[in-house]
Structure formats: C-alpha cells, structure tokens
Image (tube, rainbow, N blue to C red):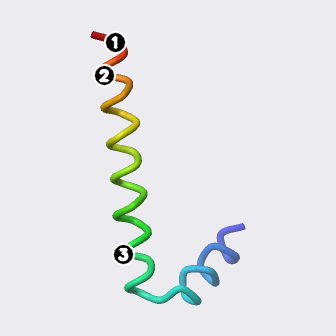
Amino acid sequence: MLGLLLFWLRCIGRGGVLRMLFVLLRSLGLGLGLVMLGRS
C-alpha cells in the first residue's frame, strides 16, 4: 500500500504533489468550516 503510494507520488512529480496537497488542505478547511457553521 505504502509502496504504491510512493510510486504514484514519484510519477506525479514534486509540483503535482504540492498542488495536490494544497487542494487537499483547502477541501479539508472547507469541510471544517461547514462543520463549524452547522454547529453554531
């Protein structure tokens, strides 16, 4: 599993990984924001 992930990341390249991480963090922040809005 981990090996497959590492292979996939290597195929994407550094720029792709950084962009993917940024998108992931942004979507995570969006989800957290929605949860906070729903709670209040």
Residue 36, which numbered label? 2
Q: Residue at x 36, y 75 (%)?
A: 18
Taking 36 as reference, is 17 above or below it? below
Secondary structure at numbered mark 1:
helix
Q: Are marks 2 and 1 in contact (CB under 8 Å)?
A: yes
Q: Quadrant of residue 23?
A: bottom left
Q: How far apart in space, not on screen, are marks 3 and 2 (Cα)?
A: 27 Å
Q: Residue at x 38, y 24 (%)?
A: 35
Residue 18, which numbered label? 3
The amino acid sitting under disc 1 is Arg
Q: Residue at x 65, y 69 (%)?
A: 2
Q: How far apart in space, not on screen, are marks 3 and 1 (Cα)?
A: 31 Å
Which x, y percent locates residue 15? Answer: 38, 85
Q: Which residue, given by chain and number where applicable, does mark 1 sit on?
A: 39
Q: Which of disc 1 and disc 3 is earlier in sequence?
A: 3
The amino acid sitting under disc 3 is Leu
Q: Going by the image, does 27 lie left or right of 5?
A: left
Give neighbour class at mark 3: few <14, some 14-19, many 20+ (Cα, 10 Å).
few
Q: Are marks 3 and 2 in contact (CB under 8 Å)?
A: no
Which of 32/10 is in front?
32
Q: Which of disc 2 and disc 3 is earlier in sequence?
A: 3
In which quadrant will I find the N terminus? Answer: bottom right
Give neighbour class at mark 1: few <14, some 14-19, many 20+ (Cα, 10 Å).
few
Secondary structure at numbered mark 3:
helix
